[in-house]
Image: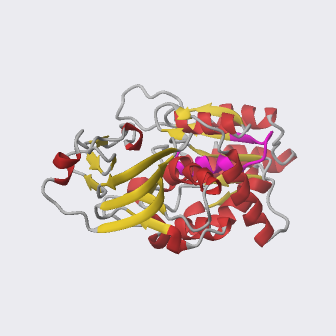
Amino acid sequence: MIERLSHATVTRGLIDRRGKFHLGAVYDSAGRLAAGSRRAPDRYRAGDPGLLSEALAGRAVERRLARALYLGHAFTHFGHFLLETIPALCWVREVEADVPLLFHPFDERGENVFTQRRHGVECLKLLGIPPDRIVMAASDLAVEELLMPPRPYDIQRGPLYDFRDVYRALRDAAQGAAPGPAARRIYLSRGRLKRRLRSRLANEAAIERRMAWRGFTVLHPERMSFANQIRAVASATIVAGVDGSALHLSAFMRPGARMLVLETSRRRTVLTLNALMEVETIPVPVNKPAAPEQPRRIDPARLDAILDKVGCPPPPGMMRRLFDLVFR
């Protein structure tokens, strides 16, 4: 299953934001593009030419490695890191402990997620992978023997292999590091993100208050360590939030747990990951606005009905009626 390429060349990774393409691929000893090293087009298309001579464009190879395991792209973006980079680490167990792990950096500034982002640093620590094993193809490399496994996750087609063990290993390590009681119901808030990254849900603040009233602990993932995020969802029986990167933390939820997805748009990646990890998805769609420019809202009555159905009742009596008058 793991392809072995002799005298391979790995060209440097680069993202062209204006042109909406990225570069960086594997070429065999004959100078032909290894198709498996190209990522399916998403926001950025792969712009690598078919021949090494065209890809190098006169550049000389800057670094040489005797052996390496090529694991695709290392995303700094949290959602893609969870979906694409972590699954690739499932292949690490198939090689010796001293084999370098080679990635293409996938970041507009060329940052290394494993040294420059907290979630990447913590990920390696939890899995027991020494950071000096990571090699980023920020320059052109020649590799005498390159091991190239297939991509376990395809951004268009979803999971291609069973890579659940790597998520489970992270979950077990995170919980073993600091075991203890945790909230059974959590709401993953986007309220403290930068303004441009916040939800397009007009009444999210009111919805968040409603969820807290229903017994959900409101968490702000961007202010938590990666290990604490994993522990929170791993201990919860039900997780809720507006669709976005944080909901991909379902990778660490227990089978049979449930996720309420407040859908401003239908994200296939959340649905496929939930299915893989045996997490039940409960959609809460927005009310469709009369015009595209109008704000989208979650109907509180619809949300209440769903929460009642999944066993999250409100406080009884007078306090419930007062809340409904103030926040509906």
Foreground: 147 or 328?
Answer: 147
> Where residue 261 sits in the image (x, y, percent)?
62, 39
Foreground: 39 or 276?
Answer: 39
Up-down: is 156 above or below 145? above
Looking at the image, residue 274 sits to the left or right of residue 322; the answer is left
Quadrant for residue 298, please give it: top right
Q: Quadrant of the C terminus?
A: top right
- Magenta-colored span: 244-259
Tell me the residue at 29%/58% (across/down): 12
Up-down: is 129 above or below 218? below
Looking at the image, residue 38 sits to the left or right of residue 153; the answer is left
Tell me the residue at 62%/51% (across/down): 90
> Where residue 246 sits in the image (x, y, percent)?
57, 52
In this figure, what is the number of numbered marks? 0
Up-down: is 159 above or below 26? above
**Can you see residue 29?**
yes
**Can you see residue 76?**
no
Q: Quadrant of the N terminus?
A: top right
Looking at the image, residue 22 sits to the left or right of residue 3; the answer is left
